[in-house]
Image: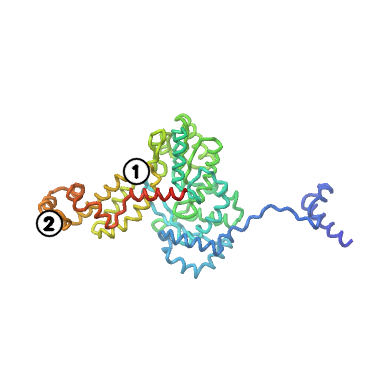
Amino acid sequence: MKDVEPEKKIEISEANQRGQGRKPEAAQVSGANFPGRKEQAGPKQPDLSERMLERGNRLKALQAVEANRGAAGVDGMEVKQLRVYLREHWVEKREQILSGNYEPRPVRRVDIPKPGGGTRRLGIPTVLDRLIQQAIHPILSPLWEEGFSAHSYGFRPGRSAAQAVKAAQAHNQSGKRWVVDVDLEKFFDRVNHAVLLARVARKVKDQRMLKLIRRYLESGIMQQGLVAPRNEGTPQGGPLSPRLSNILLDDLDKELEKRGPRFCRYADDCNSYVGSRRAGGRVLESLTRFLKERLKLAVNPKKSAVDRPWKRKFLGFSRTAHRECRVRVAPQAVERFKEAMREKFREGRGRNLRAFLESLKPKLRGWASYFSVAETRNVFEDLDPWLRRKLRCMEWRKWKKPRTRMRQLIALGLDRGRARESAFNGRGPWWSAGASHMNAALPTAYFRRRGLVSLLDEVLWFTTLREQRSL
């Protein structure tokens, strides 16, 4: 009898929990009535907050923040001060996160000009908040990564803009020679918090993590000393924004996969490829409606269009109009590069030439690396002499007076008569920089010896490297 009593209590307890009207036979098949049989519970998700705060994950996040460097937030703390701060305050901050009491600082607003006009609003978090957001990223990523669309390329491991551009080229070559270019109006500023958090909550069951993400979304924006509340948007500038944008726009990817048109998406840049203008118009109309009704996002009608791919740009690239189209650098990207270089040259006036060329290397190599996927080389062949002419112009300005210019030209190898004629020609700096006397005095080899990087050579090197890695 002693063995029977506990079973009766368990049966009564289960009957009370599941309802008095349950049939006795149904109650007896419960695993609770059989001591050797365990209840089958669903898979329990590990506590994401604890995993996010683990020492190994935190150290990786710290290294990423230090490698990215970046500007200080509203508290003025710089990246180099972060380690010292963590030694003194991390235990306190960790407890605040675990207890749900951590309050992120407002982001510092920075407006930068956009190539097509207007400004892009950035929100610079404090370095501590960047660390915490960076620690959240690898915890959230595995929950979604396998389910993301194969046509999504932005901010994902093992994927790149070059792959998106090549995929778009393949769609064009397959006969889809019309593009539906959808421009989301101020996407990062207009993200609806409720819609985004509902999608995050589909896979994140840790309430502390959800609360922390919500607080990051709702942290205010400081500008000119005043903090404004934020009811929508996830400002660019923090490590968490790209991941959240992919989570939100995954619904768009699934919708496009269901409807059938071929597409490529990189963050908020989404292009669909169709066989006719008429089909493109239908796709654009239906996508506009879907984004408005399901994701509460607006499409910019002025920048969105159905057009030929060689008349549009995607991630800084365009394509030729041939049937077997080739990837080329978009004209807008070339103009942006030139404008950035003009600003650099204005800053470089009066500086030592070798030091100035050293400061240009990261920009030139980075640009060449990104655009090395282009299959037409004429852009790089044109930009190399343009850069050399800018350098000759800068040197000509540096010499200022005609007599100084004559002495410098003689020192560089010109005969006295030619140097005098060139120095006193009365022409402007840009004309003189392109004239034969400056090309003779400052040839290509002169700049190379002082460290000038050739864009064409760099592009060829990066192309070779990429081909070797693909073998």
Position in image of residue 32 (x %, y %):
79, 55
Secondary structure at badge 2 equals helix
Front residue of 441/75: it is: 441
Mark 2 to mark 1: distance in Å?
A: 41 Å
Q: Does the CB distance between marks 2 and 1 fall below 8 Å?
A: no
Q: Residues within 10 Å of mark 2 (few under 14, many from 20)?
A: some
The answer to which image quadrant residue 51 occupies is: bottom right
Which residue lies at the image location 54% right of the left edge and 38% below the top edge?
257
Mark 2 residue type: Arg
Is 372 drawn above or below residue 138 in the view shown? above
The extreme left residue here reads 417
Front residue of 281/220: it is: 281
Disc number for residue 377 = 1
Front residue of 339/412: it is: 412
Q: Nearer the viewer, mark 2 or mark 1?
A: 1
The extreme bottom residue here reads 88
Position in image of residue 60 (x %, y %):
50, 61
Secondary structure at badge 1 equals loop
Position in image of residue 331 (x %, y %):
34, 41
Front residue of 445/4: it is: 445
Q: Going by the image, does 276 lie left or right of 118?
A: right
Location of the N terminus by quadrant is: bottom right
Is 386 drawn above or below residue 322 in the view shown? below
Mark 1 residue type: Arg
Disc number for residue 298 = none
Q: Which residue is mark 2?
A: 403
Q: Residues within 10 Å of mark 1 (few under 14, many from 20)?
A: some
Position in image of residue 243 (x %, y %):
51, 51
Is 194 drawn above or below residue 108 in the view shown? above
